[in-house]
């Protein structure tokens, strides 16, 4: 078991698997800083360029750095069943061809594998936010699983739109895709609900959201505004400045449950004013103590794309004050708070430099350090995307 444990358990970082179309090989590229000799057992899927909905599946063992393959001339999806731990990156022709092949693909696992490779490419700044949005527009309305719609469009809201040159315009495109998915779904089904949740998260029309909150005529057939959906709408309204504290308090009083308490805290932190951000920061530092679930929700509410004018002052404060949080919390909640309150949308060279300066100190608690390393890696990816595509 020594080769397995050395490669898979004791060596950091995933290999990259890349299809080199010119040479007809799959390349295995270990991390430069942590080389390893891992064996990957995958299924490679490919489709003909002139028949993009027809896929062939070929088992493949990648046990050397270059493995010759014979595949169709259209899209190629490495590890279409996500069987191995690796960063699978699509080639340029595949990224173009998926616009034609994904809407025709009936295999949900293959679609998931394809979207995972697109996400990998986006994270490595190999595909622009605009190109991802186009693929969403042509492929997602044909998706027939609630996880496929909810997870993929949720990623589009969280990562793609937020890193686009014009986040508001990108979010509007995601909203339109979600609306098409809602329209094509069976009324009252889980697919419709998954799409509607994203439609709410990407909405910018305050009047429509208020109408939905009141279960108005504009709601799609089959939709029932339950507690969870109600608070999703209220959260979006809070981010847009479409509700005030009194309205949020009234909503909490109307149905006082544990879920309502948590979502109410998140909505308060998301309000677009200085008071909301100061209120949230008092909870992060421990000046005001709150239950664990509320603390996590407040961190999610604090940082919002489009509210940088309000949150920029807290970027430097985070790196100045995070170490002191060891005095008010420990173990799991220390890790959660460090991660959740990290200024993830401040993708600037200055913020990355502040993060590395803190990581360079020898007095950083190990729990905090681990979260800082992970979050800073993600932040550097966001910065690379914005630099590559003009944000």
Image (spheres, rainbow, N blue to C red):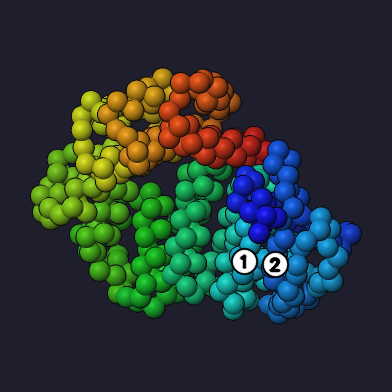
**Which residue, as the protein is rendered here, is positioned at the far right?**
23
User: Which numbered disc flags the more N-terminal residue, 1 or 2?
Assistant: 2
- Secondary structure of the residue carrying tag 1 is loop
Q: Residues within 10 Å of mark 2 (few under 14, many from 20)?
A: some
- Name the quadrant containing residue 111: bottom right
- Name the quadrant containing residue 134: bottom right
306 to 195, vertically: above or below: above
In this figure, which residue is indicated by the disc labeled 1? 83
Q: Quadrant of the C terminus?
A: top right
Can residue 336 be seen in the rendering of this structure? yes
Can residue 273 be seen in the rendering of this structure? no
In this figure, which residue is indicated by the disc labeled 2? 41
- Nearer the observer, 147 or 221: 147
Q: Position of residue 365 (x, y in %)?
A: 43, 28
- Secondary structure of the residue carrying tag 2 is strand
Give the residue at x 39% y 38%. 335
Give the residue at x 72% y 60%. 39
Q: Position of residue 355 (x, y in %)?
A: 52, 26
Q: Position of residue 292 (x, y in %)?
A: 26, 42
Residue 49 shown left or right of residue 53 in the figure = right
143 to 320, vertically: above or below: below
Give the residue at x 38% y 53%. 201
Q: Position of residue 80 (x, y in %)?
A: 65, 68
Q: CA distance from mark 1 to mark 2?
A: 7 Å
Give the residue at x 88% y 59%. 22
- Name the quadrant containing residue 112: bottom right
Circle 1/circle 2 CB separation < 8 Å: yes
Q: Quadrant of the N terminus?
A: bottom right
359 to 92, vertically: above or below: above
- Nearer the observer, 34 or 376: 34
Residue 100 shown left or right of residue 294 in the figure = right
- Nearer the observer, 37 or 5: 5
């Amino acid at each position: 078991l020594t080769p397995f444990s050395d490669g898979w358990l004791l060596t950091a970082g995933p290999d990259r698997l890349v299809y080199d179309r010119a040479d007809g090989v799959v390349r295995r590229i270990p991390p430069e800083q942590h080389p390893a000799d891992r064996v990957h057992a995958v299924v490679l899927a490919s489709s003909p360029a002139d028949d993009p909905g027809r896929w062939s599946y070929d088992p493949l063992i990648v046990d050397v750095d270059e493995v010759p393959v014979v595949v169709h001339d259209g899209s190629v999806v490495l590890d279409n069943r996500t069987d191995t731990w690796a960063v699978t990156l699509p080639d340029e022709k595949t990224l173009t061809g998926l616009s034609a092949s994904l809407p025709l693909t009936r295999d949900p696992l293959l679609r998931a594998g394809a979207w995972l490779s697109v996400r990998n490419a986006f994270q490595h700044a190999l595909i622009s936010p605009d190109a991802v949005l186009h693929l969403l527009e042509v492929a997602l309305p044909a998706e027939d699983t609630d996880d496929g719609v909810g997870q993929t469009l949720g990623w589009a809201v969280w990562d793609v739109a937020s890193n686009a040159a014009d986040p508001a315009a990108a979010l509007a495109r995601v909203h339109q895709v979600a609306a098409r998915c809602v329209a094509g779904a069976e009324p009252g089904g889980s697919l419709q609900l998954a799409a509607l949740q994203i439609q709410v998260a990407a909405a910018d029309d305050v009047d429509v959201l208020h109408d939905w909150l009141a279960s108005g005529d504009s709601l799609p057939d089959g939709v029932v505004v339950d507690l969870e959906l109600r608070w999703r709408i209220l959260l979006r309204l809070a981010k847009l400045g479409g509700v005030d504290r009194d309205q949020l308090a009234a909503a909490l009083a109307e149905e006082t449950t544990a879920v309502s308490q948590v979502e109410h805290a998140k909505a308060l932190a998301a309000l677009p004013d200085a008071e909301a951000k100061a209120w949230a920061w008092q909870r992060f530092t421990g000046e005001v103590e709150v239950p664990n679930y509320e603390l996590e929700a407040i961190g999610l509410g604090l940082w919002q794309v489009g509210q940088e004018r309000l949150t920029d002052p807290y970027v430097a404060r985070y790196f100045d004050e995070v170490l002191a949080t060891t005095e008010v919390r420990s173990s799991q909640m220390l890790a959660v708070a460090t991660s959740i309150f990290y200024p993830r949308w401040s993708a600037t060279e200055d913020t990355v430099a502040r993060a590395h300066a803190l990581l360079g100190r020898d007095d950083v608690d190990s729990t905090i350090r681990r979260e800082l390393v992970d979050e800073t890696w993600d932040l550097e990816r966001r910065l690379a995307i914005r630099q590559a595509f003009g944000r």
